[in-house]
Every structure is written in structure tokens, then in C-alpha cells.
Amino acid sequence: MNVPLYQLLGGKVRNKLKVYAWIGGDRPDDVAAQASARKGQGFTTIKMNATSDLGWLDSPSALLPAVERLRAVKALGMDAGIDFHGRVHKPMSKQLAAALAPHSPLFIEEPLLSEHISGIAALAAQTSIPIALGERLHSRWDVRPFLEAGAVDILQPDIAHVGGVSELRRIAAMAETYDVAVAPHCPLGPIALAACVQVMAATANFAIQEMSLGIHYNVGGADLTSYVRNPEVWRVSEGYIDLMEGVGLGIEVDEREVREKAVGAEAWVSLGFGLGGPGGEVREW
């Protein structure tokens, strides 16, 4: 039909989208310098892991570095989402949320594993910080109990997990009926990100979009811009990217580059802290 995908979803409701980038890695450190570099790239918002792995009941002192990292980013005039990553258990999560609250994080993400809906709802009632989650949910039916429980303020469905454009669109519409914002999870490649952008261009309750530009998973010289012939679509200015105007997803995949890099490529394996605790116990990565 020779039109952008968003035209088939009812048309755009915005011309540009707010975006954020990752800093800090899985064991966050040196965040001030990394946040400053992101600011130089045009970002005004970042996300970082709150902590390294924690015990079910750890020393309260283990939470202090998370507060200092948030303060360091805020001192640069930037906003920060703080990802608990499901690695913080209930006894520590409520303490960490309380410690972070005076420093106004943009949101806290996965304050508990998504299996614990009642615990997340209880924490949401205790804190003024917006609760974000959704990457571990795979359909409207997975999402609905969180909306009904009032457990989420910012829904983060992953387009690759929910099955694509259509389900992401339906989940966003469902969230709107509960006055819940949508900020798609996307530490992925250009096709997934472009699909998210197309859906969010036509979504009224869109809040902010994750980008994998320079994320710590990108190794071996490959990045978000590596496999497209129009990398300028990912240029960030004052915290936003412009909405692509090209046909379909709005990107031009460099298929030759993809084929060359696919030769001998190994499947990505999820990272893990493994036997990372002081007692040899397995901990959430």
C-alpha cells in the first residue's frame, strides 16, 4: 500500500517519540560518566539496574549505592528509570523503593518478579513512584490481572514476546482503559524497535520507548545501526527520535550485512549470576 505501518493502525498521533537508553550494565557502576555520554548523544532519560544480585534479606547498606547512582544521574539534569529486574525480593524491595523515592526516579521496573501480583500491588499502594513491568507477560490475558489489581502504572510489553504488532496494539488499548501508560520493552534490534515505533506512533497512551543503542549486550562491534541502510532514523535529539516516514516499518534492512554476520553466529544465551550468593545460592540475574 506504500504507506507507513502506522497509517494502517488509524494514523499517527505524534510526530516524534521520547526515548531512553541503558547505562551501567548488569552490575551497575560508573554511571555518572555513562549518563553524561548519553546526554552527549541527545538522550535526556536513561535506565539502569538498581543493584547487582541481592539476597532475600540483605544488609540495608547494600541498597545505598543504588541511591547514590540515582543522585549522580539526576545531578546531570537527566531522568532515570530504575530496573529492579526481578532480582530484588519483597523484604528488600520495599526498602529500596522507600530509599529511592526522595530522589524522584522516573519509574521503578519489576520491583518483584511478575509471579507476585499481590506483592507488586501492595508495593504500588505504598510508594508514589510509578511501577513499570511487562516484559515477562506474553498476552492480553497475562496483562489483565495486573491492570485489574492496580499493580502497574507503566506497562512494558515486549513486541517479540507478545507475538508482534497486533497483540502489542491490543495490549496498549487495554491499558488505556485503566489509565496506564505504555513504554515498550525493547533491548533488541532494529526490526523490533521499528515495529514498536510504528505501533506507538498511533497509540495515545504511549510514554517512552526503550532503545538498544550502545546497550551492554551489544558486543563484537554490532549495534542498533549496524543492519540498516538508513541509520539516521535512530538519531536522538533532545530526548526524542523523529517518526519515520518510510513505507512499512520505515527502515531499510541491509540483508547482505545480515547474511554475512549470520555465518557461524551462535545463539544468544541469557546471562545469569548463577551460584553468585555468598552461600553458593542461585540468584536472579
Image (tube, helix red, strand yellow):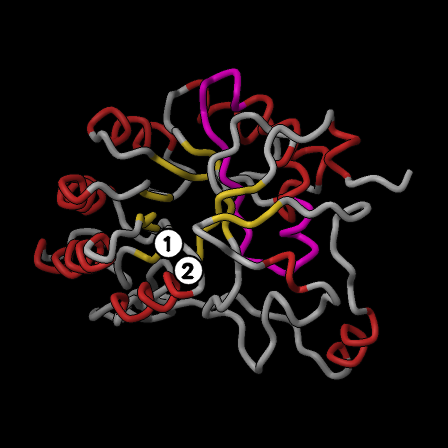
Q: Residue 225, image x and y in percent?
A: 63, 67
* Numbered circle sitting on residue 22: 2
Q: Are marks 1 and 2 in contact (CB under 8 Å)?
A: yes
| Quadrant assignment for the N terminus | top right
Q: Which of marks 2 and 1 precedes in the sequence?
A: 2
Q: Residue 160, image x and y in percent?
A: 65, 48
The quarter holding residue 51 reads bottom left
Among all residues in the image, which is located at the extreme right? 1
Q: Is residue 91 visible?
A: no
Q: Secondary structure at mark 2?
A: strand
The quarter holding residue 107 reads top left
| Quadrant assignment for the C terminus | bottom left
Image height of 157 relative to 20, above or below: above
**Highlighted magenta segment, given as a residue range:** 175-196
* Mark 2 crowd level (few <14, some 14–19, many ≥20, 10 Å Cα): many
In-front residue for pair 112/227: 227
Q: Secondary structure at mark 1?
A: strand
* Numbered circle sitting on residue 271: none
* Mark 1 crowd level (few <14, some 14–19, many ≥20, 10 Å Cα): many
Residue drawn 64% across and 44% down?
243
Q: Amino acid at mark 2?
A: Trp
Residue drawn 37% across and 27% down?
151
In-front residue for pair 37/182: 37
In-front residue for pair 282/161: 161
Q: Amino acid at mark 1?
A: Lys
Q: Is residue 82 magenta?
A: no
CA–CA distance between discs 1 and 2?
Answer: 5 Å
Residue drawn 16% across and 54% down?
67
Residue drawn 39% across and 20% down?
149
Q: Residue 102, image x and y in percent?
A: 13, 40
Residue underneath mark 1: 47
